[in-house]
Amino acid sequence: MDRIALRGGKPLFGEIPVSGAKNAALPLMAAAILTDEPLTLLNAPALADVATMGALLGGLGVEVWRDRVVGQLSLRASAIESCVAPYDVVRKMRASILVLGPLLAREHKAQVSLPGGCAIGARPVDLHLKGLEALGAQLDLREGYVFAEAPGGLKGARIVSPVVSVGATENLLMAAVLAKGETVLENAAREPEIVDLAECLRAMGARIEGEGSSTIRIQGVERLRGANHRVLPDRIEMGSYMLAPAVAGGSVEILGARRDLVGALIERMEAAGVSIEDSPRGLRVSRKPGERLRAVDIETAPFPGFPTDLQAQMMALLTMAEGESRIEETIFENRFMHAPELTRMGARIEVHGGSALVKGVERLKGAPVMATDLRASIGLILAGLAAEGETIVSRVYHLDRGYERLEAKLSACGAEIRRLRDQPTTAARAAVA
Ligand code: UD1
């Protein structure tokens, strides 16, 4: 397994471009199932998760190809040859569940493996399933799979979600666009990725209103057509790179960064003492090297609140802020697995259930650490950028799921970061020792 080696303590200067959003691209790819015409996604990131979704769709009979134009991904579901999303793919990526709604909408049947638990908590899919039942699907859970069918097609319904769920909102939106009659999704997620999906579906001929608010209304149509759609910038990648000069010191222009996508992060970073200014091509983030930041409290919440997907990165920053910061994680239980790793780098963090108390230290020290999930991994990379000496982050396959050209983007700003390719175990041990 590859590892990433960093030598920290160097301020960063330059610019970092933001790629298309992983979490927008995955549902958009699943939306290709809804039409027999081509769907072309511009600004699609080249990431392991996008490849996994491509392989899953390929197995259903969807043609998926990258055009010569960088970042352009095309999909065509002329015919659906299989309605099965197998365990081997779903276990790698929870977002595989997003094919369930579109398959039911188009083929009136689907067989999708249940994702099971994952590193950041139980993460059930009950809301997806209950919503689809409300749309008339009959579900049977056996052998680790959900067998779903809707003889005669799905029918519009009013669905009130007890919890705000991004994935369930996306699945139900994609199911409802081809259902008979009106569907109303109440307590829907308001994330920008939902708005992006709704815009793409509308370009395909769907009738949708209210995306971006907590009530989405969908009038089912007979069929959808192909479209070209530009994928939204990745606000989590954007936020992660905004935190890089904040952690390491320096001044970096984040190209394509938008205040409307990262408002809650900007507010907390400014409260901690980081400077964020509008720049010609995005946002410029600066902090004088050596200038101490202030502790701030954060609480994760659905959009427009502070994203859970930026919590680990913000914790990396707060480990070096003056005073005590309290972090409340309200979306996922067990999402502090980066805390003990940061502690190995000299951070002082006490975790009690969904709450972490970070007592700021002057500086972190490099250490070998292990990534446990995608966002924990980038949190450790950020900490390594600031730490004295060498940090080696192992299990970086997590990073490859969500960060395109990570080392290239950071080293262009002066970071000393390199990938150590997979080696025989003894050599790997020696390198880490
Ligand atoms: C998406 C994002 C993920 C992000 C998360 C929260 C993608 C591919 N992933 O994940 O990066 O961290 O939103 O912003 O877009 N829940 C249930 N039952 C369900 C579904 C969810 O109880 O059927 C709970 C979850 O356990 C969690 C909360 O609802 O506590 C929110 O989860 P959800 O918004 O569904 O996250 P994902 O869509 O899986």
Image (spheres, rainbow, N blue to C red):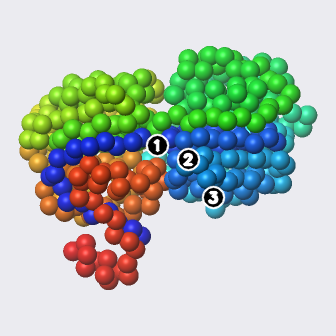
Q: Position of residue 19 (x, y in %)?
A: 46, 43
- Asked if the residue at label 2 sits under 8 Å from ligand 1, the reply is no
The residue furthest right is 152
Kindly identify the residue that appears in the image at 41 percent across and 54 percent down: 405
Kind of element beneath mark 1: loop
The image quadrant of residue 355 is top left
For disc 1, the neighbor class at 10 Å (few under 14, some 14 to 19, many from 20) is many
Looking at the image, residue 27 lies above or below residue 157: below
Kindly identify the residue that appears in the image at 35 percent across and 50 percent down: 409
Q: Nearer the viewer, residue 60 or 347?
A: 60
Q: Which residue is mark 1?
A: 19
Q: Which residue is mark 2?
A: 71
- Asked if the residue at label 3 sits under 8 Å from ligand 1, the reply is no
Kind of element beneath mark 3: helix
Q: Which sits earlier in the primary sequence, circle 2 or circle 1?
A: 1
Q: Which disc is residue 274 wearing?
A: none
Label 1 near label 2: C-beta < 8 Å?
A: yes
Q: Which residue is mark 3?
A: 89
Q: Position of residue 317 (x, y in %)?
A: 22, 40
For disc 3, the neighbor class at 10 Å (few under 14, some 14 to 19, many from 20) is some
Q: Amino acid at mark 1?
A: Ser
User: Nearer the viewer's eye, disc 2 or disc 3?
Assistant: 2
Q: Amino acid at mark 3?
A: Val
